Image (cartoon, rainbow, N blue to C red):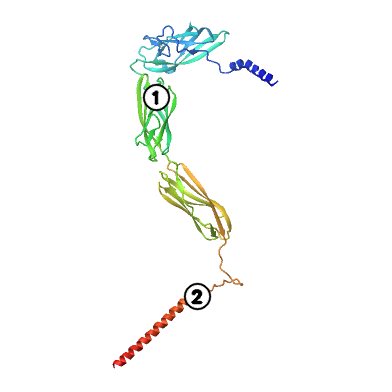
Amino acid sequence: MKKNILLAVLLIALFLAPFCAARGESAPAFTVDETCVLRGMDRSLLQGYTPSMDGSRWNLVLPVRSDVAVGAVKAELIPPAGCTSFFRGGDFTSVARVEAKGVWGVRLSPAIFSSPKNADYPCVIRLTGKDAAGNTLTEDIPYTVRVRGATAAVEKVRIEIKDVQADLSVGEEGEIWVTLANPCAAIHIEDLELKISDGAGQILPLHAEAVSAGSLPIGETITVTYPVTVLEKATVAPHVLKLDLSWTALGQAASYSGSYTVPVRQEIRLEQGGLKMAPSVAAGDSLSVTLPLMNMGKADVVNTLATVTMPGVTERQSVLVGTIQPGETKQAQLILSPAKGLEGAFDGSLAVECTDQDGNEFSFSLPLHLDVTPPVLPASTADGTEKKQETKTPPAVWALVGGCGFLLLLLLTQGTLLRRKLHLLEEAKL
């Protein structure tokens, strides 16, 4: 039973497939055959066929293939407004007929000025025909009219550098993005290449020195990505980069060089030392909170701010540590003073915020815990008056005093005996 149901589903799917395909995106009614060579062509489009100019007319032969068209096909050349310096006017339409199996030969010969200028004119060739059922077929085929061989160009070839952005960090791979625009009205830019160099030698190409950007059509904008690597010794500061552009336009090589400044950054490396803070304090007393802050990076850390938040003790208390230079240590020190009558355990945090010289922010937070105890009060008597504490002298002090008195007595006795001896000696001599 299940096999029969599965088979039925497959048959229905196969039956509906052509209808679903018909509803999808249809194939173009007309396409250019780049391999076909018709009368009047010296080679195929793929081999480099170019229209001819006989001095008064521009002659184009374009093989067009169609699988649905029947009979003659109308071809119309629609030039841009700026193309009036090349085409003099006249007949921009023709009737194309089948010249090979499934191939119509579109032949256009509009009149041109006698002294045309080198240019690339983006035109449109509009083809209109009918299918076997009489339905109208229309297709617009983009075509660039390339004028070469003149002594002058229709305008000056130029490229605009719209923007230069970079994401560069010390010791890491990064990218530089260069946005280029083609402001020309009738010049197509090809074979575009970009080179970027750092005069300090601290930013190097990651792969090839030159990055190919392909072509830059008229009036369009592209962004070229240039991969680089930043050396460990690179300075954290703006770097002046040299941009070299080379391209081909109107069959001629051209180039441009310019200098642009991009920043080189480093991740903020603000390390913390050991937090110094007493675990408890008596209400009404003060305690110090000290946190060493060390800048382990290569750039200044600025606007360093330390803030203690401990609900019940202090809502917000801050100290500005300021600028910490590379390799420098500074102390973030705050004083907490719990109010009298406060008691209990309190939790809070110590938050440190800072930025680098480019305004990039960095922060971290440490938890804090503090026990606030009642203040120590002096002892009192039963009637509420303060009782003076009697100071007792330790026995060792009394022993030391007694010893000193005994020694003094011995000295006095010895002195008396010596004086008596002297008197007896003096009497014996007499």
Which quadrant is home to the N terminus?
Answer: top right
Residue found 43% across the figure and 51% down from its top? 330
Q: Earlier in the sequence, mark 1 or mark 2?
A: 1
On the image, the x and y values in percent for residue 397 come to 47, 75
On the image, the x and y values in percent for residue 32 come to 47, 13
On the image, the x and y values in percent for residue 406 come to 43, 81
For residue 165, above or below residue 398: above
Mark 1, other Cα within 10 Å: few <14 / some 14–19 / many ≥20 = some
Which image quadrant for residue 252? top left
Which quadrant is home to the C terminus?
Answer: bottom left
As drawn, the residue found furthest toward the bottom would be: 430
Q: Which residue is mark 2?
A: 395
Q: Which residue is mark 1?
A: 192
Mark 1 residue type:
Leu
Mark drawn on residue 140: none
Mark 2 secondary-structure assignment: helix
Task: Tell me if 180 is positioned left or right of 13 in this view.
Answer: left
Is any atom of residue 397 visible in this view?
Answer: yes
Mark 2 residue type:
Pro
Mark 1 and mark 2: span between their CA atoms?
102 Å
